[in-house]
Image (spheres, grey):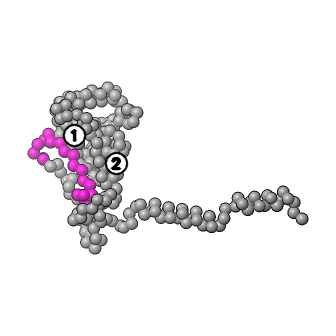
Amino acid sequence: MFHPKFSARTHELKMNKPSSSLIFLLVVLFSCLGISVADSHNVFDSCPTATDRIDFINGFPCKNPTIVRTDDFTSAKLTGPVNTDDRFSSLVKVVTAADFPGLNSLGLSISRTDLGTDAIISPHSHPRATEMFFVNQGIVLAGFIDTKNRLFQEFLKPGDVIVFPKGLLHFCLNSGYETATIFSVYNSQNPGVVNVNGAMFEPADSSHFIDKFLDKLKALSSLPNLKFNPNVTLPRYISL
C-alpha cells in the first residue's frame, strides 16, 4: 500500500519532467539556429562581383564560377596617386567590391591616402567599419575621439599602424616635410563615410572649421609637446 504523500510526490515529478517530444523539438530548433548562423558566412570559396548585373541587394551578385579568373583577385588601383605632377596634391581613394571583384562577400575594402605637406583630412567616421591605418611613407599625426570626448592621437612614422574603431570620429594630417602615403583596410564591403565638415558647414566656412578643429586638437592633446611642422600652414585639406 502506497502512502498518499508518496503518490502525490510521484505525480508531481511526472508533471514537471519534460516530455521527450519537447526535448526533441528543442534539439531540432537549436540545430537549425546553428545551421542558419553558419550559412551567414560564405557558402562558396569565392564570389567575385558580376559587374554586368544591377540588383538591389545587400552586396553584389556573384560571377558564374566557371568564368572566375585570377585577375578577379588582384588589383593595381592603389599603385600610385592620381596626380603625381603636383607635390601638394592630396587624395583618398577607396577600393571596394564594385572596383575589385575578388573582395565581394569577404567583408573587406581598402584605400590609399596621399597627403601633401600642407594637407589634413578633416574629422569623419565610417558607420559600418573599423579602419586599420598603416603609414607607408612620411610622418603623420593621426587620432580619434571616443564617445566620452577623449582624444587618442599619435605621431606615426613609416611602418606604424593605428586602429580607428567603428563609427568614431578620426582624422590625420601630414606633420612631415614630404608627401605622406597611407594604406587602410576596412572590415566592411562598404564602410561608408560621415564627414562633420561637409554635413555641418558651407564650403565658405571650411577654413574656419579647420582652424577651430586644430585649436581644439591642441587643447585636448594627450601629447605634452604637440608641435606641428612649422612650415605647414594647412591651407589645403580633404573633406571626404
Q: Is residue 84 above or below residue 219?
A: below
User: Would you say residue 101 sits in the magenta stretch?
Assistant: yes
Mark 1 surroundings within 10 Å by alpha-carbon count, few (fewer than 14), some (14 through 19), many (20 or more): some
Of label 1 and label 2, which has the lower sequence position? Answer: 2
Q: Between 27 and 71, which is closer to the camera in this rendering?
A: 27
Q: State the extent of the magenta-drawn residues as a range.
A: 83-103
Three-letter amino acid code of the residue under disc 2 = Arg
Residue 186 lies, in percent from the top left, at 32, 50
Location of mark 2 (residue): 128
Q: Position of residue 115 (x, y in %)?
A: 20, 41
Is 138 part of what is drawn in magenta? no
Classify 10 Å Cα crowding around label 2: few (below 14), some (14-19), many (20 and above).
Answer: some
Residue tagged by mark 1? 239
Q: Which mark, residue 126?
A: none
> What is the tally of numbered marks visible in this picture?
2
Q: Amino acid at mark 1?
A: Ser
Q: Position of residue 136 (x, y in %)?
A: 25, 46
Q: Quadrant of residue 207?
A: top left
